[in-house]
Image: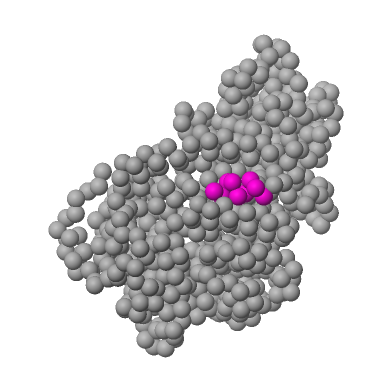
Amino acid sequence: MKKPLCLLTVLALLCFMTTGWAENESPESILSSMTLREKAAQMMLPAFRTWKEGDAGAVKVTELNEEIRAMLAKEHFGGVLLFGENFADAEQTLRLIADMQEANRAGGGVPMLIAVDEEGGSVARLSYGTIGVSNMALSATGDPLYAWLMAGIHGKEIRLLGINVNFAPVMDVNSNAANPVIGIRSFSDDAQTVAEYGKAFIQGLHDVGVMATMKHFPGHGNTDTDSHTGFPVIESTYEELLSNELIPFKAGIDAGADLVMTAHIQFPQIEKETYTSTSTGEQVYLPATMSRTILTDILRGDLGFEGVIVSDALEMAAVANNFTGSDMLRLAINAGVDLLILPSVYDTDSFHQIEVMLDTAVRLVESGEIDESRINESVLRILTLKQKYGLLEQKDFSVTEEKIAAAKDGIGSQAYRDAEWIIAKKALTLVKNENGAFPLNLKAGEKALILFADSCASRAGTGDLAVKLLKEKQALPEGAEITVMKNTADNEDACIEAAKEADHVILVHRVYAIACLNPATGDGFSSGTFDKIIQAVHDMGKTVIVVSCQLPYDAARFPEADAILLTYWGSAMRELPKEGSFWSPNLPVGLLSCFGLYSAEGKLPVNIPALNDQYQPTNTILFSSVQ
């Protein structure tokens, strides 16, 4: 329920009220009426995920409090980025976004970009919406039409809430199997495949009126470091990028992508300017986000991109741990960034830090360290994009019963759930099947075991869901039993005994980092348990199916398994889902296929490298992709 405005907030709104902009004004006219500070704010995109007051714990921002309302009225930000914490249900989100727009409008601001990372699969912020299947699963279907369809579903759902920008699709080529952050967010390790499916995804968003964002330029796929926590380096030359990573971005530019998000990655063969790290004192190379060579010369000059360049989040360790706030702004803006994703605002003090950033941007222009013409270029691009999508003419953000009904009916609808279920089935990929292991033939009175590795223990509820669905479909023979277990550091012997007692064994494994493949690590000890189970079951003349529920590279980890099935995702489901709850269909569909309900006809979208004795990927390809 929306709280009434207190006197302080009302006074703040009045104090910060400007003459503002008039509907139907051109971008050029609006720009000419802006102060330097307003122009700097138009280039900034804050996020309000949680809010902390005093000693009370942080609460999710699902409605505007008085301080955030006053902030949005005071500083005319170009937009706001929403995260999972901002989504509770459809009506709540509608009201939150409408209140944000109204607060900004009350202060005289131009209607804002409302952005979200709704990639689908592992990055889906809309918890009550259609989660989707992951980009890698989309390409495993072998038909870009499914990428167009899935993007359209995501676009329709967020559009019903008032969100106009999707920070998707990921156009990175996942050429490094050890990549800890891209993985199934990528369509493929083949540049042409990424280009083809990425274009279809962009078109799907455009067809429902949502802005599309390609990320992470010039490519985050060929690294084993996550820029959220480290500072990646890619040694590729420009010529090498042209022949691989830049192919999808060029295709997306030609397809009309509206925004391009930068990567906080060092490319020392391309950008040779260095900077003294604020945390280590060592020399680091300017990342793509701060490289004029990469953003202006290559992205705009060589590739011809005319839209809005948006930075990846400035609170990520790659930049936050190596650059001062002032230099971060100066370098990024001078490099060509138009829109800056600010550090999250979580209390009054953190908002003051954002105000300092605005003050700093103004000072950098006034001191000549940033030319005001550079600011004007960016703001004009942002305003032009808003005009293209009708935002400059939008003046009514009220939440009506019709909007609420449309959102409740349209988001997570049965039609959308059916569509993602079909796509998940199409993506199932069987890379190995020997000894008639897949599908298993469960007979009356027999026992089956579904054992989840520790790395996917939070997915074990999916096993219970599969059993429930098998019963509903009357697919369990009389007297047949299915046991669902989780492997832990303490129950290896019990898991091995359960596998010996079962007539059929399904091992569910998850790789989210290469360490998951090494039995000597805390992430990978279950892989050692699985080795022992496979041997024990084989000694008894029985077969084993391994089901991969995230990165497909564990297909190389269990070469002795009789059958290996790839699903490319499986969202956390700690218990049997409640009626009306939402979950990704990839793993449920995969488990049902093991019992013969569905076939596995997907095409492998990446090469699976063999592993060495240290369980690291090698240059030898064990399973080849189908392009």
The extreme bottom residue here reads 368
Q: Name the chief secondary structure element in magenta.
A: helix
Between 589 and 176, the one lying in front of the other is 589
Q: Is residue 153 left or right of residue 544?
A: left
Image quadrant where one finds the N terminus? top left
Quadrant in the picture for residue 427 = top right
Please provide the residue range marked out in magenta.
Answer: 144-152
Residue 177, quarter of picture: bottom right
**Which x, y percent locates residue 454?**
62, 38
The residue under the point 53% across, 53% down is 207
* Residue 414, position as x, y percentages in the image: 51, 33
Q: Residue at x 71, y 12 (%)?
A: 444
Give the residue furthest to the left.
7
* Any part of residue 190 in sight: yes
- The correct choice, above or below, for 418 with respect to 63 in the image is above
What residue is shown at x 78% (from left), y 34% (from top)? 563
Looking at the rendered structure, the number of numbered marks drawn on it comes to 0
Colour convention: one colour
Q: Is residue 454 left or right of residue 574?
A: right
Task: Name the foreground residue: 33 vs 260.
Answer: 33
Q: Nearer the viewer, residue 245 or 535?
A: 245
Is residue 452 visible in this depiction of the protein? no
Task: Reply above or below: 520 against 258.
Answer: above
| Residue 598 magenta | no
* Percent position of residue 456, x then y: 61, 39
Q: Is residue 593 above or below residue 296?
A: above
Residue 350 lies, in percent from the top left, at 34, 63
| Residue at screen point 73% across, 19% down | 442
